[in-house]
Image (cartoon, rainbow, N blue to C red):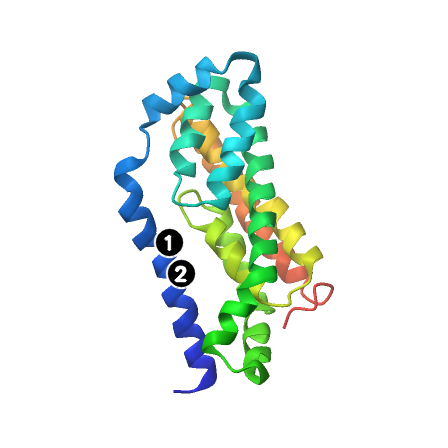
């Protein structure tokens, strides 16, 4: 098996395990949206701080359901306050995941890939296609952008590139969850129009910054 193909297979295997198998096994223990809403309401004045911390934890430990928590927050706090807390939490959580991937991920990767061949993995993730894929996974609600941050951390992509893409990419997911949780319809033309503009604009921005980001 070619080395590049082997890297892709290993990466997909880890991704499927974390993104689908683990959440499925713990799904029965996840609180319902109604239970989360009651819990958040009981926090009182500490609600904003605790909610942001819990949302960050859900990003770092993905089997905890970030989507349900986001919808519950939109119901309790309204669209914009919930969006701000979710966005801060998701960006912070993704940065933590990136650091964990960079700090420990390469050690795991070396178990499967010879060290002299790791540069091929670095080249794979330090590409425009990889940056665009990470953006899409973070932007769209329900997609595993938190897992993707771990894998991006495995590579030697510049921290500045990851951080800038993360800040913009997480707008879509977090605003969507807060918006729908507050009772608004995802099919609202105004919402869909703004969502599409930011999404397409983000993709075009990454492409325009390809040289500055040293993507190939």
The answer, for residue 201, to whether it is visible in the render is no
Q: Element type at marker 2?
A: helix
Q: Where, by quadrant of the figure, is residue 168 drawn?
A: top right
Q: Kindly indicate the quadrant of the structure image that contains residue 177.
A: top left
The alpha-carbon separation of the residues under discs 2 and 1 comes to 6 Å
As drawn, the residue found furthest toward the bottom would be: 1
- Mark 2–mark 1 CB contact (< 8 Å): yes
Residue 72 visible in the snapshot:
yes
Residue for badge 1: 19
| Image side of residue 201 versus residue 140, left or right | right
Query: Residue at position x 57%, y 36% from top?
Result: 89
Q: Label 1: few (<14), some or many (≥20) within 10 Å?
A: some
Q: Is residue 159 above or below residue 190?
A: below
Q: Position of residue 195 (x, y in %)?
A: 50, 40
Residue under label 2, please give it: 15
Q: Secondary structure at mark 1?
A: helix
Figure quadrant of the N terminus: bottom left
Q: Residue at x 41, y 25 (%)?
A: 72
Q: Please determine whether, in this image, residue 16 is positioned above or below residue 172.
A: below
**Which residue is found at the position 37% from the left and 53% from the top?**
19
Q: Residue at x 53, y 38 (%)?
A: 56
- Toward which corner of the image does residue 14 lie, by quadrant? bottom left
Extreme residue toward the right, this view: 212
Observer-nearest residue: 16 or 208? 16
Q: Position of residue 87 (x, y in %)?
A: 57, 36
How many residues crowd mark 2 within 10 Å: few (<14), some (14–19), many (20+)?
some
Q: Position of residue 153 (x, y in %)?
A: 58, 60
């Amino acid at each position: 098996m070619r080395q590049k193909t082997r890297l892709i297979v290993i990466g997909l295997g880890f991704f499927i395990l974390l993104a689908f198998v683990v959440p499925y096994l713990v799904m029965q223990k996840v609180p319902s949206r109604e239970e989360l809403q009651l819990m958040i309401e009981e926090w009182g004045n500490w609600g904003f701080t605790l909610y942001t911390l819990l949302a960050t934890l859900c990003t770092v430990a993905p089997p905890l359901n970030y989507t349900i928590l986001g919808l519950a927050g939109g119901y309790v706090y309204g669209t914009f306050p919930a969006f701000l807390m979710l966005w801060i939490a998701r960006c912070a959580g993704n940065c933590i995941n990136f650091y964990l991937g960079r700090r420990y991920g390469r050690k795991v990767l070396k178990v499967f890939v010879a060290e002299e061949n790791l540069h091929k993995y670095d080249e794979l993730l330090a590409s425009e296609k990889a940056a665009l894929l990470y953006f899409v996974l973070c932007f769209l609600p329900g997609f595993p952008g938190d897992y993707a941050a771990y894998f991006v951390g495995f590579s030697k992509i510049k921290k500045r590139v990851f951080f800038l893409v993360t800040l913009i990419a997480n707008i879509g997911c977090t605003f969507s969850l807060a918006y729908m949780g507050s009772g608004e319809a995802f099919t609202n033309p105004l919402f869909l129009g703004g969502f599409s503009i930011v999404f397409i604009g983000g993709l075009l921005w990454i492409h325009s910054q390809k040289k500055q980001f040293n993507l190939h």
